[in-house]
Image (cartoon, rainbow, N blue to C red):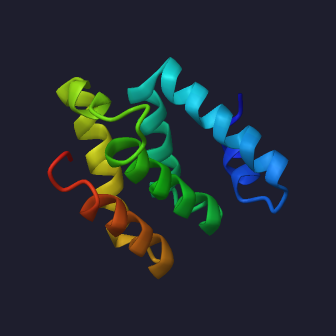
């Protein structure tokens, strides 16, 4: 599955496409939670990626770590190197040239201060 397409679909206005995107996001997270978060963090920190996709990446990171009932506690079980990669990518985004992306990254950090 192409994560960029899934994220674009999550921003769609069609409820059916959004639900399918949410299902795909949960499937990817279930298959490889740490790798999925790293990939989202890479998208978030990539200045060449469309703003909306970067913002939704930050939201998914925040929610997967702190709020999604399917994955609560999984972040804490990741190996330290994986957590460092995620944390460094998200924190690097705080220097983004786009204020909306910076805000999304800041919300991901603030929402997970105890975990990150």
| Residue farthest top in this picture | 31
Query: Does residue 18 appear left or right of residue 56 in this picture?
Result: right
Tell me if 81 is positioned left or right of 41 in this view. Answer: left
Residue visible at 73% across and 53% down in the picture: 8
x, y percent for residue 89: 35, 50
Q: Residue furthest front?
A: 69
Count of marks placed on residues: 0
Percent across and percent down for residue 5 are 74, 44
Residue 27 or 104: which is nearer the viewer? 27
**Observer-nearest of 15 and 60:** 15
Instruction: Identify which residue is drawn at 60% across, 36% down.
Output: 25
Query: Is any part of residue 98 visible from this angle?
Result: no
Q: Quadrant of residue 11?
A: bottom right
Residue 42 appears anywhere in the view: yes
Residue 103 left/right relative to 44: left
Q: In front here: 71 or 101?
A: 71
Task: Tell me if 81 is positioned left or right of 44 in this view.
Answer: left
Q: In the figure, 8 relative to 81: above or below? A: below
Residue found at the far left of this picture: 114
Percent x, y for residue 70? 44, 31
Residue 36, percent from left and from top: 48, 32
Q: Residue at x 85, y 56 (%)?
A: 14
Above-or-below relation of 59 to 101: above
In the rendered image, which quarter is residue 2 located in? top right
Q: Residue at the spot x=39%, y=32% of the render? A: 71
Q: Quadrant of the N terminus?
A: top right
């Amino acid at each position: 599955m192409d994560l960029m397409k899934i994220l674009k679909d999550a921003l769609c206005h069609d409820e059916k496409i959004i639900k399918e995107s949410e299902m795909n996001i949960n499937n990817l997270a279930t298959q490889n939670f740490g790798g999925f978060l790293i990939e989202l963090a890479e998208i978030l920190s990539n200045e060449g990626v469309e703003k909306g996709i970067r913002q939704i990446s930050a939201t998914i990171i925040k929610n997967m770590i702190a709020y999604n009932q399917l994955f609560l506690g999984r972040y804490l079980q990741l190996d330290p190197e994986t957590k460092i990669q995620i944390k460094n990518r998200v924190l690097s985004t705080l220097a983004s040239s786009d204020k909306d992306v910076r805000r999304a990254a800041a919300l991901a950090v603030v929402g997970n201060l105890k975990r990150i």
